[in-house]
């Protein structure tokens, strides 16, 4: 027996834990936390241990699937690509290029292949609409950052390890392991905060696992974070905890914002957001008294009709208290592979309205070039110029994860042609005509280009493949470049993949050498020769590392980073704690952080109306569980075994008034649909709020997830209407959905 050990970063969630894998004869025998990992130091969660199970899952696709006589059947790669060419070219011929839509799922955010090639694929296919999972999650945060800092990726992260006071809204990192703040071991980091005398306050409609370890839990009415945040600013000002005169000159317009928020006193909002005014005023005083403090908000703040404005107000609170871009506050990462904040210069920034166009049918904003997922069904089902007649989905399961999912399911069934890149025949890909099988995580390299840009320490960690991919199989980057070749009319052959890959590498080098940060005298041809020992995403990553803020610049900075250096450091490289990055990282045309952005200021009118909206008797909110990650890990028996997790949580008082009993069933009905869910009576939810996790509902005919089907659960997104959105970002409301509940 041949035994080996491999180290790699877990790609399953945003925490990025280092794993130690024991292998025997090409099989994973054990996975533990890597004690020497520079970031996670041995931490891992139950999901991280299943990479081997996932690789060996008999339901995971190993070969392409092609529909024939109405059934998806295994096919050769050549057959699959021929069928894609025939199908897409047919749609283009009949309806034009704009008839293709593309959906990029959440796993693409954790995928080196996707990060390095999806842009080439999209540019070449020129689809009529691009959708992504971002638009049902963090798009409001990205939009707020785009407006404030000039780049959507300039997202402040909580400096957890140095803060002394943390207010956390709509986040449950003890279960989710964090989001838009890459940090392994949230439990340990939050415990350390309290051990050093710091305080944690959780604002959430549910007494989550994180709330249970907090000093205070404020049970807010779902969807009213924007009121709470506005009142927090006002309370800070009223309590004379704010001195705008001492704030940096590059914080523009905070005085205007503070004045506009004056009507939102704690007393004015308490009746609507459910948090008593004295508690808000007390919290403001304690927050201001801390030397280092931070407000951190996540999905509960973004999936509301006020997601962008709430994200803006989080930064306003941090800024007016001197905690934006300050140690222990909300800071900006300096990622090794570079980002919009490390390339270019402050003086060359340009402000753009990120939502200049609107979608064809629903007239929702197109933000950062992407249609909101909420628009997908209508763009497919509504006839007329620009109607989508074909879809390409890459690594997502929008039938379970997007709003009004029954209607979207119907829409997919109506397409003339559909291609999917995925590991499974799931609730979405069962509609496809061709599925290209994505390799397992162990068969491809990993570097979290996107998420290390949101890390709470500057770190870099590369993982080579652990297991070999079959000789005749493609990785995702090859699939995407073949699709790009088809879009360009070049064909889908190996030579096309090589040419497009080579061209992208040359373009990336030329661009980097043209950056103001580049040392003088570098030659693009010589530089390219240095990286040409690799190909594909590994070569692109090498270029980005070499030309990033710690890079070796092709030998000009001999002690700098390259992919060789990361390969020689399998436990990662720690590049230090976050440091203040403003004003250099600002990319607005004014060169300032533009807090008084007109779109955000104007949205306060809508917030004013929220104050007077009647609270529905019952509203639905979502939740995460530790052993689940959206929809796609429910086929791992080790994760889904035990008590059912897809339950409707109901407060005991509500259960009594509604006639619900623990273990019974309830019919939950919203404007978009109805489901029957098992009842869990618990006081973790506040009265008037019921909670159902998303990502379940594995009972669709045609999906091939045998374990998941045994634990099907119900699809909460049947209950989320697609047409209630944050009008700035187009992101759908997924929390605070009015529902009716009756025993079933
Ligand atoms: S916390 Fe996230 S990154 Fe860490 S082991 Fe679990 S799933 Fe993987």
Image (cartoon, rainbow, N blue to C red):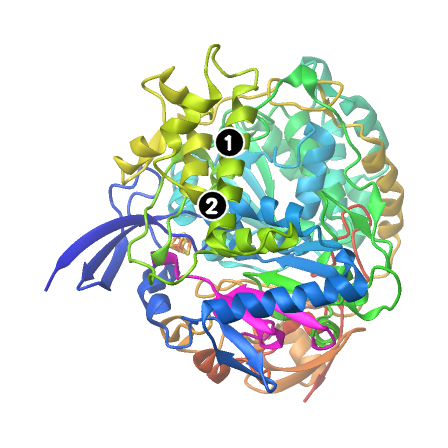
Which quarter shows the N terminus?
bottom left
Q: Single out the mark in the foreground, 1 or 2.
A: 2
Q: Position of residue 213 (x, y in %)?
A: 46, 52
Is residue 247 shown to the viewer in this render? no
- For the magenta stretch, what is the residue range? 413-442
Q: Of residues 485 and 396, which is closer to you in this image?
A: 485
| Vertical order, 415 against 567 (above or below) | below
According to the picture, the residue beneath numbered tag 1 turns out to be 506
Q: What residue is at 70 percent from the left and 77 percent from the top?
A: 413
Mark sitting earlier along the chain (1/2): 2
- In the figure, is residue 567 to the left or right of 391? left
Is residue 589 shown to the viewer in this render? yes
Q: Of residues 237 and 631, which is closer to you in this image?
A: 631
According to the picture, the residue beneath numbered tag 2 turns out to be 498
Q: Quadrant of residue 390?
A: bottom right
Q: Quadrant of residue 354?
A: top right
Q: Of residues 552 and 624, which is closer to you in this image?
A: 552
- In the figure, is residue 322 to the left or right of 728? left
Q: Position of residue 531 (x, y in %)?
A: 38, 31
Q: CA distance from mark 1 to mark 2?
A: 12 Å
């Amino acid at each position: 027996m041949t035994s080996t050990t491999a180290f790699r970063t877990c790609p399953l969630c945003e925490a990025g834990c280092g794993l130690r894998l024991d292998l025997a004869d090409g099989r994973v025998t054990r996975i533990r936390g890597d004690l020497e990992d520079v970031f996670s130091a041995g931490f891992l969660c139950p999901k991280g241990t299943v990479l081997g199970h996932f690789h060996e899952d008999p339901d995971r696709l190993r070969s392409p699937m092609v529909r024939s006589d109405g059934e998806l059947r295994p096919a050769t790669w050549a057959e699959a690509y021929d069928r894609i060419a025939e199908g897409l070219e047919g749609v283009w011929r009949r309806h034009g290029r704009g008839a293709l839509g593309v959906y990029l799922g959440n796993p693409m955010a954790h995928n080196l292949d996707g990060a390095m090639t999806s842009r080439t694929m999209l540019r070449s296919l020129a689809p009529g609409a691009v959708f992504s999972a971002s638009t049902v999650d963090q798009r409001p945060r990205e939009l707020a950052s785009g407006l404030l800092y000039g780049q959507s990726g300039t997202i402040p992260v909580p400096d957890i390890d140095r803060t002394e006071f943390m207010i956390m809204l709509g986040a449950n990192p003890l279960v989710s392991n964090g989001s838009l703040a890459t940090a392994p071991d949230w439990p340990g980091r939050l415990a350390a905060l309290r051990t050093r005398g710091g305080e944690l306050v959780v604002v959430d409609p549910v007494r989550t696992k994180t709330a249970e370890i907090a000093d205070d839990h404020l049970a807010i009415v779902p969807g009213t974070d924007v009121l709470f945040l506005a009142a927090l600013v006002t309370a800070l000002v009223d309590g004379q905890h704010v001195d705008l005169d001492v704030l940096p000159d590059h914080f523009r317009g905070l005085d205007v914002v503070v004045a506009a928020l004056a009507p939102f006193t704690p007393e004015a909002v308490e009746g609507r957001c459910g948090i008593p005014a004295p508690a808000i005023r007390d919290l403001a005083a304690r927050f201001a008294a801390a030397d280092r403090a931070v407000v951190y908000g996540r999905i509960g703040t973004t999936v509301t009709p006020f997601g962008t404005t709430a994200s803006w107000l989080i930064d306003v609170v941090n800024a007016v208290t001197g905690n934006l871009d300050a140690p222990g506050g909300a800071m900006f990462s300096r990622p090794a592979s570079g980002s919009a904040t490390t390339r270019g210069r402050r003086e060359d920034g340009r402000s753009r309205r990120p939502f200049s166009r609107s979608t064809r049918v629903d007239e929702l904003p197109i933000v950062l070039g992407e249609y909101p997922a909420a628009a997908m069904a209508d763009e497919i089902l509504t006839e007329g110029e620009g109607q989508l007649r074909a879809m390409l989905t890459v690594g997502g399961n929008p039938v379970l994860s997007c709003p009004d999912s029954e209607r979207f399911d119907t829409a997919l069934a109506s397409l003339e042609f559909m291609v999917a890149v995925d590991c499974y025949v799931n609730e979405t890909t069962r509609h496809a005509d061709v599925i290209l099988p994505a390799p397992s995580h162990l068969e491809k390299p990993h570097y979290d280009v996107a998420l290390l840009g949101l890390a709470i320490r500057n770190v870099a960690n590369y993982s080579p493949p652990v297991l070999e991919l079959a000789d005749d199989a493609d990785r995702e980057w090859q699939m995407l470049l073949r699709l790009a070749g088809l879009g360009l009319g070049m064909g889908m052959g190996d030579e096309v993949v090589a040419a497009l890959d080579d061209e992208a590498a040359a373009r990336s080098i030329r661009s980097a050498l043209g950056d103001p940060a580049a040392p003088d005298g570098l030659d693009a041809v010589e530089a390219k020769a240095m990286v040409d020992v690799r190909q594909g995403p590994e070569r692109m990553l090498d270029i980005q590392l070499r030309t990033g803020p710690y890079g070796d610049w092709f030998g000009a900075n001999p002690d700098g980073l390259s992919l060789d250096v990361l390969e020689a450091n399998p436990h990662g490289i720690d590049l230090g704690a976050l440091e203040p990055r403003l004003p250099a990282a600002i990319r607005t045309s004014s060169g300032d952080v533009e807090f008084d952005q007109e779109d955000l200021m104007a949205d306060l009118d809508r917030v004013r109306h929220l104050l007077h909206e009647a609270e529905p008797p019952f509203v639905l909110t979502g939740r995460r569980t530790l052993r689940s990650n959206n929809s796609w890990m429910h086929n791992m028996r080790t994760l889904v075994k035990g008590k059912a997790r897809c339950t409707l949580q109901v407060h005991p008082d509500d259960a009594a008034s509604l006639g619900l009993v623990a273990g019974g069933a309830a019919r939950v009905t919203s404007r978009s649909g109805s489901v029957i869910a098992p009842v869990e009576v618990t006081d973790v939810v506040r009265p008037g709020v019921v909670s159902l996790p998303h990502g379940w509902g594995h009972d669709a005919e045609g999906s091939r997830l045998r374990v998941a089907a045994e634990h099907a659960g119900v699809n909460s997104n049947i209950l989320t209407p697609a047409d209630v959105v944050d009008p700035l970002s187009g992101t759908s409301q997924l929390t605070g959905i009015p529902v009716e509940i009756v025993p079933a």
